[in-house]
Image (cartoon, grey):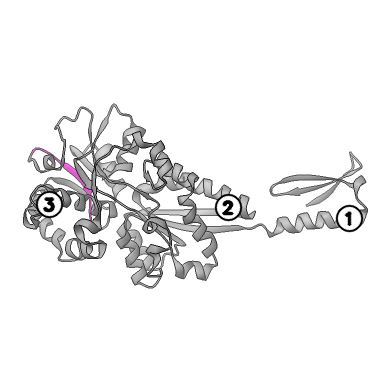
Amino acid sequence: MVKNDNSLGEHVTVIMNTGVIKLNIRRYSASAVFLLTLAIVTGNSWAKEVQLLNVSYDPTRELYQQYDEAFSKYWHQKTGDDVKIRQSHGGSGKQATSVINGLQADVVTLALAYDVDAIAESGRIDKNWLKRLPDNSAPYTSTIVFLVRKGNPKQIKDWSDLIRPDVSVVTPNPKTSGGARWNYLAAWGYGLEHNNQNQDKAKEFIKTLYKNVEVLDSGARGATNTFVERGIGDVLIAWENEALLANNALGKSKFEIVTPSISILAEPTVAVVDKVVDKRGTRELATEYLKYLYSPTGQEIAVKNYYRPRDKAIAEKYRAVFPELKLFTIDEVFGGWGKAQKEHFATGGIFDEIIRR
Protein backbone atom coordinates (compact mmCIF):
# COMPACT_ATOMS: atom_id res chain seq x y z
CA MET A 1 0.00 0.00 0.00
CA VAL A 2 1.23 3.53 -0.81
CA LYS A 3 0.00 6.74 0.76
CA ASN A 4 1.02 10.38 0.97
CA ASP A 5 2.26 11.59 4.33
CA ASN A 6 0.71 15.10 4.23
CA SER A 7 1.86 15.98 7.73
CA LEU A 8 5.43 16.10 6.50
CA GLY A 9 4.68 17.25 2.96
CA GLU A 10 7.89 15.81 1.65
CA HIS A 11 7.66 12.02 2.05
CA VAL A 12 5.90 9.11 0.44
CA THR A 13 5.29 6.23 2.86
CA VAL A 14 5.35 2.63 1.59
CA ILE A 15 3.80 0.05 3.91
CA MET A 16 5.01 -3.50 3.32
CA ASN A 17 4.78 -6.85 5.08
CA THR A 18 8.30 -6.36 6.29
CA GLY A 19 7.83 -2.81 7.60
CA VAL A 20 7.43 0.85 6.55
CA ILE A 21 9.67 2.80 4.19
CA LYS A 22 9.55 6.58 3.83
CA LEU A 23 10.90 8.16 0.65
CA ASN A 24 12.17 11.75 0.74
CA ILE A 25 10.57 13.18 -2.41
CA ARG A 26 12.74 16.34 -2.36
CA ARG A 27 15.57 14.12 -3.67
CA TYR A 28 13.57 12.70 -6.59
CA SER A 29 11.34 13.86 -9.42
CA ALA A 30 7.67 12.80 -9.29
CA SER A 31 8.25 10.14 -11.97
CA ALA A 32 11.28 8.78 -10.12
CA VAL A 33 9.31 8.53 -6.88
CA PHE A 34 6.54 6.68 -8.72
CA LEU A 35 8.94 4.20 -10.31
CA LEU A 36 10.87 3.62 -7.08
CA THR A 37 7.65 3.06 -5.15
CA LEU A 38 6.35 0.71 -7.84
CA ALA A 39 9.58 -1.30 -7.71
CA ILE A 40 9.37 -1.67 -3.93
CA VAL A 41 5.71 -2.67 -3.93
CA THR A 42 6.15 -5.05 -6.86
CA GLY A 43 9.23 -6.62 -5.28
CA ASN A 44 7.32 -7.07 -2.06
CA SER A 45 4.47 -8.76 -3.91
CA TRP A 46 6.89 -11.38 -5.21
CA ALA A 47 7.46 -12.64 -1.67
CA LYS A 48 5.17 -15.58 -0.97
CA GLU A 49 4.31 -18.08 1.70
CA VAL A 50 5.20 -21.68 0.93
CA GLN A 51 4.36 -24.77 2.94
CA LEU A 52 6.40 -27.84 3.79
CA LEU A 53 5.31 -31.05 5.51
CA ASN A 54 7.91 -32.90 7.57
CA VAL A 55 6.80 -36.42 8.55
CA SER A 56 8.93 -37.44 11.50
CA TYR A 57 9.11 -40.04 14.24
CA ASP A 58 7.89 -39.91 17.81
CA PRO A 59 10.44 -38.06 20.01
CA THR A 60 11.43 -35.24 17.62
CA ARG A 61 8.60 -32.82 18.42
CA GLU A 62 10.72 -30.44 20.48
CA LEU A 63 13.70 -30.69 18.12
CA TYR A 64 11.76 -29.69 15.02
CA GLN A 65 9.67 -27.08 16.77
CA GLN A 66 12.89 -25.19 17.50
CA TYR A 67 14.56 -26.08 14.21
CA ASP A 68 11.58 -25.00 12.08
CA GLU A 69 11.60 -21.58 13.69
CA ALA A 70 15.32 -21.15 12.97
CA PHE A 71 15.01 -22.41 9.40
CA SER A 72 12.03 -20.16 8.67
CA LYS A 73 14.08 -17.12 9.65
CA TYR A 74 17.02 -18.34 7.56
CA TRP A 75 14.82 -18.96 4.51
CA HIS A 76 13.13 -15.57 4.76
CA GLN A 77 16.49 -13.81 4.97
CA LYS A 78 17.76 -15.77 1.98
CA THR A 79 14.73 -15.57 -0.32
CA GLY A 80 12.25 -13.10 1.14
CA ASP A 81 9.67 -15.88 1.24
CA ASP A 82 7.83 -17.04 4.32
CA VAL A 83 7.74 -20.77 4.92
CA LYS A 84 5.13 -22.54 7.02
CA ILE A 85 6.38 -25.94 8.18
CA ARG A 86 3.87 -28.51 9.33
CA GLN A 87 4.87 -31.51 11.43
CA SER A 88 3.55 -35.05 11.73
CA HIS A 89 4.84 -37.36 14.47
CA GLY A 90 4.31 -41.01 15.36
CA GLY A 91 6.03 -44.37 15.41
CA SER A 92 8.59 -44.38 12.59
CA GLY A 93 7.25 -47.54 10.93
CA LYS A 94 3.69 -46.24 10.98
CA GLN A 95 4.81 -42.87 9.61
CA ALA A 96 6.62 -44.56 6.72
CA THR A 97 3.48 -46.55 5.92
CA SER A 98 1.43 -43.34 5.88
CA VAL A 99 3.80 -41.78 3.33
CA ILE A 100 3.72 -44.95 1.22
CA ASN A 101 -0.08 -44.79 1.32
CA GLY A 102 -0.16 -41.22 0.07
CA LEU A 103 0.53 -38.75 2.88
CA GLN A 104 2.00 -35.75 1.03
CA ALA A 105 5.27 -35.37 2.91
CA ASP A 106 7.87 -33.09 1.33
CA VAL A 107 10.52 -34.56 3.62
CA VAL A 108 10.77 -37.46 6.02
CA THR A 109 12.98 -37.42 9.12
CA LEU A 110 12.60 -40.94 10.43
CA ALA A 111 14.18 -43.13 13.09
CA LEU A 112 16.09 -45.46 10.81
CA ALA A 113 17.18 -46.01 7.22
CA TYR A 114 14.97 -49.05 6.70
CA ASP A 115 11.80 -46.96 7.00
CA VAL A 116 13.09 -44.55 4.33
CA ASP A 117 14.10 -47.53 2.18
CA ALA A 118 10.54 -48.84 2.43
CA ILE A 119 9.25 -45.54 1.03
CA ALA A 120 11.89 -45.70 -1.71
CA GLU A 121 10.70 -49.19 -2.65
CA SER A 122 7.24 -47.71 -3.24
CA GLY A 123 8.74 -45.31 -5.79
CA ARG A 124 8.13 -42.12 -3.83
CA ILE A 125 11.81 -41.56 -2.94
CA ASP A 126 14.85 -42.08 -5.17
CA LYS A 127 16.59 -45.34 -4.23
CA ASN A 128 19.94 -43.53 -4.00
CA TRP A 129 18.62 -41.19 -1.27
CA LEU A 130 21.17 -42.36 1.33
CA LYS A 131 24.11 -40.76 -0.50
CA ARG A 132 22.49 -37.40 -1.24
CA LEU A 133 23.48 -35.88 2.10
CA PRO A 134 26.59 -36.27 4.32
CA ASP A 135 26.99 -39.08 6.86
CA ASN A 136 24.55 -41.37 5.04
CA SER A 137 21.82 -38.75 5.39
CA ALA A 138 21.94 -38.93 9.20
CA PRO A 139 22.62 -35.36 10.44
CA TYR A 140 22.63 -36.35 14.12
CA THR A 141 22.89 -39.58 16.09
CA SER A 142 21.80 -41.07 19.39
CA THR A 143 22.12 -44.34 21.27
CA ILE A 144 20.08 -46.48 23.65
CA VAL A 145 20.19 -46.05 27.43
CA PHE A 146 18.04 -46.78 30.50
CA LEU A 147 15.85 -44.41 32.48
CA VAL A 148 15.24 -45.56 36.06
CA ARG A 149 13.52 -44.07 39.06
CA LYS A 150 15.45 -41.88 41.49
CA GLY A 151 17.83 -43.86 43.66
CA ASN A 152 17.75 -46.73 41.15
CA PRO A 153 15.83 -48.96 43.61
CA LYS A 154 16.38 -52.11 41.53
CA GLN A 155 20.10 -51.32 41.12
CA ILE A 156 20.00 -51.67 37.34
CA LYS A 157 23.50 -51.27 35.89
CA ASP A 158 23.56 -53.10 32.56
CA TRP A 159 21.51 -55.12 30.07
CA SER A 160 21.92 -58.28 32.16
CA ASP A 161 19.83 -56.72 34.94
CA LEU A 162 16.83 -56.42 32.61
CA ILE A 163 16.29 -60.19 32.56
CA ARG A 164 16.02 -60.53 36.33
CA PRO A 165 12.55 -61.77 37.35
CA ASP A 166 12.05 -58.81 39.74
CA VAL A 167 12.53 -56.15 37.02
CA SER A 168 9.64 -54.67 35.01
CA VAL A 169 10.65 -53.22 31.63
CA VAL A 170 8.97 -50.63 29.40
CA THR A 171 9.91 -50.41 25.70
CA PRO A 172 7.89 -49.71 22.51
CA ASN A 173 6.79 -52.27 19.94
CA PRO A 174 9.39 -52.96 17.21
CA LYS A 175 6.57 -53.60 14.73
CA THR A 176 5.55 -49.92 14.81
CA SER A 177 8.42 -48.00 16.41
CA GLY A 178 11.85 -47.36 14.96
CA GLY A 179 13.21 -46.58 18.41
CA ALA A 180 11.97 -49.97 19.60
CA ARG A 181 13.95 -51.69 16.84
CA TRP A 182 17.09 -49.86 17.96
CA ASN A 183 16.33 -50.97 21.57
CA TYR A 184 15.92 -54.59 20.52
CA LEU A 185 19.09 -54.63 18.42
CA ALA A 186 21.12 -52.95 21.15
CA ALA A 187 20.04 -55.68 23.58
CA TRP A 188 20.78 -58.40 20.99
CA GLY A 189 24.26 -56.96 20.45
CA TYR A 190 24.89 -57.18 24.19
CA GLY A 191 23.65 -60.77 24.16
CA LEU A 192 26.13 -61.63 21.44
CA GLU A 193 29.00 -59.78 23.12
CA HIS A 194 28.55 -61.66 26.39
CA ASN A 195 27.88 -65.08 24.87
CA ASN A 196 30.86 -65.45 22.51
CA GLN A 197 28.76 -64.36 19.52
CA ASN A 198 26.39 -67.29 20.01
CA GLN A 199 23.16 -66.42 18.18
CA ASP A 200 21.02 -68.95 20.05
CA LYS A 201 22.09 -67.61 23.43
CA ALA A 202 21.50 -64.04 22.25
CA LYS A 203 18.00 -65.07 21.18
CA GLU A 204 17.33 -66.64 24.57
CA PHE A 205 18.57 -63.46 26.27
CA ILE A 206 16.15 -61.34 24.22
CA LYS A 207 13.27 -63.75 24.86
CA THR A 208 13.82 -63.52 28.62
CA LEU A 209 14.07 -59.72 28.45
CA TYR A 210 10.76 -59.38 26.57
CA LYS A 211 9.02 -61.60 29.11
CA ASN A 212 9.72 -58.76 31.54
CA VAL A 213 8.17 -56.11 29.27
CA GLU A 214 4.97 -54.86 30.86
CA VAL A 215 3.78 -52.53 28.07
CA LEU A 216 4.60 -52.43 24.34
CA ASP A 217 3.55 -48.93 23.26
CA SER A 218 3.32 -48.07 19.57
CA GLY A 219 5.99 -45.35 19.76
CA ALA A 220 8.90 -44.09 21.84
CA ARG A 221 7.06 -41.06 23.24
CA GLY A 222 4.15 -43.28 24.29
CA ALA A 223 6.58 -45.56 26.14
CA THR A 224 8.12 -42.56 27.89
CA ASN A 225 4.67 -41.38 28.98
CA THR A 226 3.86 -44.88 30.27
CA PHE A 227 6.99 -44.93 32.41
CA VAL A 228 7.08 -41.27 33.48
CA GLU A 229 3.45 -40.25 33.79
CA ARG A 230 1.69 -43.53 34.50
CA GLY A 231 4.43 -44.81 36.79
CA ILE A 232 4.60 -48.24 35.15
CA GLY A 233 7.85 -50.24 35.14
CA ASP A 234 11.22 -50.18 36.86
CA VAL A 235 13.21 -49.24 33.76
CA LEU A 236 12.53 -47.60 30.41
CA ILE A 237 14.71 -48.63 27.47
CA ALA A 238 14.95 -45.37 25.54
CA TRP A 239 16.66 -43.15 23.04
CA GLU A 240 19.40 -41.27 24.87
CA ASN A 241 17.85 -37.97 23.77
CA GLU A 242 14.44 -39.00 25.10
CA ALA A 243 15.90 -40.10 28.43
CA LEU A 244 17.87 -36.85 28.82
CA LEU A 245 14.80 -34.79 27.90
CA ALA A 246 12.61 -36.61 30.44
CA ASN A 247 15.27 -36.39 33.13
CA ASN A 248 16.00 -32.69 32.66
CA ALA A 249 12.45 -31.55 31.93
CA LEU A 250 10.82 -33.37 34.84
CA GLY A 251 13.59 -32.90 37.35
CA LYS A 252 16.53 -35.03 38.33
CA SER A 253 14.83 -35.64 41.66
CA LYS A 254 12.53 -38.19 40.01
CA PHE A 255 14.71 -40.14 37.56
CA GLU A 256 18.25 -41.21 36.76
CA ILE A 257 19.91 -42.25 33.52
CA VAL A 258 21.93 -45.47 33.42
CA THR A 259 24.36 -45.84 30.53
CA PRO A 260 24.98 -49.53 29.72
CA SER A 261 28.42 -50.97 29.02
CA ILE A 262 27.65 -51.38 25.33
CA SER A 263 24.96 -50.06 23.00
CA ILE A 264 24.20 -49.34 19.36
CA LEU A 265 24.95 -46.23 17.32
CA ALA A 266 21.45 -45.08 16.38
CA GLU A 267 21.37 -43.07 13.16
CA PRO A 268 18.04 -41.36 12.38
CA THR A 269 17.90 -40.54 8.68
CA VAL A 270 16.32 -37.83 6.52
CA ALA A 271 15.23 -37.64 2.88
CA VAL A 272 13.35 -35.54 0.35
CA VAL A 273 10.19 -37.26 -0.93
CA ASP A 274 10.89 -36.86 -4.64
CA LYS A 275 7.44 -37.64 -5.97
CA VAL A 276 5.83 -35.02 -3.74
CA VAL A 277 8.34 -32.18 -4.13
CA ASP A 278 8.34 -32.49 -7.92
CA LYS A 279 4.55 -32.37 -7.94
CA ARG A 280 4.37 -29.40 -5.54
CA GLY A 281 7.43 -27.53 -6.81
CA THR A 282 9.13 -27.57 -3.41
CA ARG A 283 12.34 -29.47 -4.20
CA GLU A 284 14.70 -26.53 -3.62
CA LEU A 285 13.05 -25.63 -0.32
CA ALA A 286 12.87 -29.25 0.89
CA THR A 287 16.52 -29.90 0.00
CA GLU A 288 17.68 -26.75 1.76
CA TYR A 289 15.56 -27.65 4.80
CA LEU A 290 17.47 -30.90 5.23
CA LYS A 291 20.88 -29.43 4.41
CA TYR A 292 20.43 -26.77 7.09
CA LEU A 293 20.37 -29.55 9.70
CA TYR A 294 24.13 -29.88 9.09
CA SER A 295 24.78 -26.15 9.61
CA PRO A 296 26.20 -24.88 12.93
CA THR A 297 22.73 -23.59 13.81
CA GLY A 298 21.10 -26.93 13.04
CA GLN A 299 23.75 -28.85 14.96
CA GLU A 300 23.43 -26.59 18.00
CA ILE A 301 19.66 -27.13 18.03
CA ALA A 302 20.22 -30.90 17.81
CA VAL A 303 22.48 -30.75 20.88
CA LYS A 304 19.97 -28.64 22.81
CA ASN A 305 17.52 -31.49 22.25
CA TYR A 306 20.13 -34.05 23.34
CA TYR A 307 21.03 -35.53 19.96
CA ARG A 308 24.70 -36.19 19.32
CA PRO A 309 25.96 -33.79 16.63
CA ARG A 310 27.96 -34.76 13.54
CA ASP A 311 29.96 -31.52 13.52
CA LYS A 312 33.23 -32.40 15.29
CA ALA A 313 33.81 -28.94 16.74
CA ILE A 314 30.32 -28.81 18.22
CA ALA A 315 30.65 -32.40 19.48
CA GLU A 316 33.84 -31.43 21.30
CA LYS A 317 32.16 -28.34 22.74
CA TYR A 318 29.43 -30.49 24.32
CA ARG A 319 31.56 -33.49 25.15
CA ALA A 320 30.47 -33.48 28.80
CA VAL A 321 26.80 -33.86 27.86
CA PHE A 322 27.21 -37.26 26.24
CA PRO A 323 29.00 -40.05 28.13
CA GLU A 324 31.45 -42.23 26.27
CA LEU A 325 30.52 -45.88 25.82
CA LYS A 326 31.28 -48.75 23.50
CA LEU A 327 29.09 -48.46 20.42
CA PHE A 328 28.56 -50.89 17.56
CA THR A 329 26.79 -50.23 14.27
CA ILE A 330 23.99 -52.12 12.62
CA ASP A 331 26.25 -52.92 9.67
CA GLU A 332 28.93 -54.43 11.90
CA VAL A 333 26.67 -56.75 13.88
CA PHE A 334 23.59 -57.30 11.72
CA GLY A 335 24.76 -56.76 8.15
CA GLY A 336 22.64 -53.64 7.61
CA TRP A 337 18.99 -52.74 8.00
CA GLY A 338 17.71 -54.86 5.13
CA LYS A 339 19.05 -58.05 6.66
CA ALA A 340 18.11 -57.08 10.22
CA GLN A 341 14.55 -56.24 9.23
CA LYS A 342 14.06 -59.49 7.35
CA GLU A 343 15.52 -61.72 10.06
CA HIS A 344 14.17 -60.01 13.16
CA PHE A 345 11.12 -57.85 12.43
CA ALA A 346 9.38 -59.19 9.32
CA THR A 347 6.26 -61.30 9.72
CA GLY A 348 7.37 -64.67 11.08
CA GLY A 349 10.78 -63.29 12.07
CA ILE A 350 12.65 -63.75 15.33
CA PHE A 351 10.71 -61.06 17.19
CA ASP A 352 7.41 -62.80 16.33
CA GLU A 353 8.86 -66.04 17.66
CA ILE A 354 10.06 -64.67 20.98
CA ILE A 355 6.98 -62.57 21.68
CA ARG A 356 4.67 -65.57 21.70
CA ARG A 357 3.78 -66.32 25.29
Q: Could you tell me residue 100's position as x and y percent?
A: 36, 68
Distance in Å between CA atoms under marks 1 and 2: 32 Å
User: Number of callouts in the render?
Assistant: 3
Residue at numbered disc 3: 192
Question: Which mark is on residue 32?
Answer: 1
Can residue 62 be seen at all in this image of the molecule?
Answer: no
Query: Which mark is nearer the camera, 2 or 3?
Result: 3
Q: Is residue 322 above or below residue 44?
A: above
Stretch of the chain drawn in magenta: 166-175
Residue 321 covered by magenta stretch = no
Dot 1 lies on which element?
Answer: helix
Give the residue at mark 2: 75
Comparing marks 3 and 1, which lies closer to the viewer?
3
Q: Residues within 10 Å of mark 2 (few under 14, many from 20)?
A: some
Residue 298 picture location, percent across and down: 47, 47
Could you say which disc has been placed on residue 110 in the image?
A: none
